[in-house]
């Protein structure tokens, strides 16, 4: 397990890379407790709970973003909570 500050920095950098790769504001990607970004083309979300949300733990996010785990595998294992018709961000990962 990486040290906390190293994991936090990796999560935030990979979220920034995702935001650059998938500009937009239709899906909120949450990696508690380290960060969240809005990505993807489509209807913009501004208030309340977004209609399209992806949430996972930091280790899962790092593994997905770096290609060490596949989207389908993570979903099957219950490591990703994804809601909304635009919540599948697999086209943007790995980076």
Image (tube, rainbow, N blue to C red):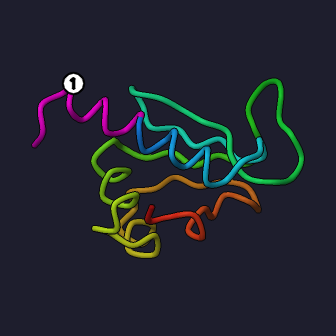
Residue at the image position 44 percent from the left and 37 percent from the top: 31
Q: State yes or no: residue 81 in magenta.
A: no
Q: Tell me the quarter of the picture where residue 44 sits.
A: top right
Please state the horizontal and vertical placement of residue 50, each as a whole percent of the image.
75, 37
Q: Which quarter of the rendering shows the C terminus? A: bottom left
Secondary structure of residue under mark 1: helix
Q: Residue 45, relative to residue 59: is it above or below?
A: above
**Is 80 or 91 nearer to us in this picture?**
91
Please state the horizontal and vertical placement of residue 5, each as a whole percent of the image.
21, 24
How many numbered discs, if any? 1
Q: Tell me the quarter of the picture where residue 46 sits.
A: top right
Mainly helix, strand or loop, the magenta region? Answer: helix
**For residue 18, side relative to residue 86 (left or right):** left
Residue at the image position 49 percent from the left and 41 percent from the top: 15
Q: State yes or no: residue 3 in magenta.
A: yes
Residue at the image position 73 percent from the left and 55 percent from the top: 84
**Residues drawn in magenta:** 1-12
Q: Provide the residue designation for mark 1.
A: 5
Please state the horizontal and vertical placement of residue 60, each as a whole percent of the image.
33, 53
């Amino acid at each position: 397990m990486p040290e906390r500050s190293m994991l936090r920095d990796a999560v935030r950098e990979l979220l920034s890379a995702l935001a650059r790769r998938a500009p937009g504001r239709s899906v909120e990607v949450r990696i508690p407790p380290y960060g969240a970004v809005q990505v993807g083309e489509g209807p913009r979300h501004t208030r309340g709970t977004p209609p399209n949300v992806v949430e996972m733990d930091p280790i899962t996010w790092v593994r997905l973003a770096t290609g060490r785990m596949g989207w389908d595998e993570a979903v099957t294992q219950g490591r990703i909570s994804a809601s909304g018709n635009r919540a599948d961000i697999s086209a943007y990962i790995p980076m």
